[in-house]
Image (spheres, rainbow, N blue to C red):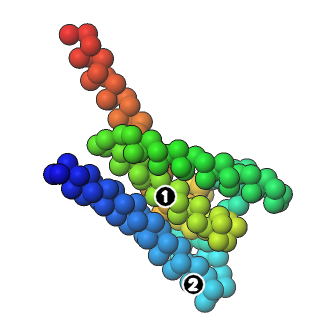
Amino acid sequence: MPNINFKKNIFFFNFTFVILIFILDRISKIYVIELFKKNLDNNLYESKFLNIHLIWNEGIAFGLMSFNDNNFYNFLTLIIIIVTLIVLYISYKNIGLKRYALLCIFGGSIGNLYDRIYYNAVPDFIDFHFQEFHWFIFNFADIFITLGVIIMIMTELFGNNKENLNEKY
C-alpha cells in the first residue's frame, strides 16, 4: 500500500509542476495582451536590453513555418499535439531530472498549444537585445521549453559519460 501513496504523491507533484508552468505562462500572456488592448501599441516597454513587444506568432519556434494557409496551420497544430503527447508519454517513462526536463517541455508546449487553438497564434513578447542585435521574441512557455531541452541535452551528455565509465571499469 505505501507504494501506491508514493505514486499518487509523485503524480500530484508532477501535475502541479506542469500546471504551475501553464499558469505562469497564461498570466504573463493575458497581462501583456491586456496592456496591448489598453495602449493599442505593440511596444509596451522599452529599455537598454529588454523590450516588451507583442507579436503574434503563427508558425512554430521563432516564427518558422509561418504561412497564411489554414490547412497547413491546422496540420502543423496536429503535429504539435502529437509531439506534445509523445513528450508526456516519455516523461512518464523517465525518472529524476530527465522527467522534470520533459515536464518543462510539456508544460511550455501546452501553454503555446492553448494559444494556437484559442487565438490561432501564439503571443510572443520578450525581446532581449544588445544595441541593434535582437534575439527572437519569445514568451514564458518558450523559456520552459528551452530550459527543458537544455537540461535534456546536459543529462544525455553527462549521464551517458557516467554510464560509459561504469561499463569500462
Q: Which residue is mark 2?
A: 34
Viewer-side label of 2, 1: 1
* Residue type at the position of mark 2: Glu
Question: Of 130 and 161, which appears nearest the observer?
Answer: 161
- Residue beneath the point at 47% across and 49% down: 88
Question: In screen coordinates, is 167 left or right of 69?
Answer: left
The C terminus - image quarter: top left
- Residue 165 is labelled as none
Question: Disc 2 versus disc 1: distance between alpha carbons?
Answer: 21 Å
Mark 1 falls on what kind of element? Answer: helix
Residue 53 percent location from the top left of the image: 59, 71
In the picture of the structure, the residue carrying the numbered disc 1 is: 108
Left-right relation of 147 to 71: left
- Mark 1: give few (<14), some (14-19) or many (20+) Cα within 10 Å: many
Q: Say left or right for 155 vs 69.
A: left
**In the image, what residue occupies the spot 57% across and 61% down?**
112
Query: In the picture shown, does residue 40 fall above or below 106?
Result: below
Whole-percent x, y for residue 5 in the image: 21, 56
Among the 4 quarters of the image, the one containing residue 35: bottom right
| Residue farthest to the left, as pictured | 2
Identify the residue at the far bottom of this view. 38
| Earlier-in-chain disc, 2 versus 1 | 2
Percent position of residue 45, x then y: 53, 76
Is residue 156 shown to the viewer in this render?
Answer: yes
Q: Amino acid at mark 1?
A: Gly
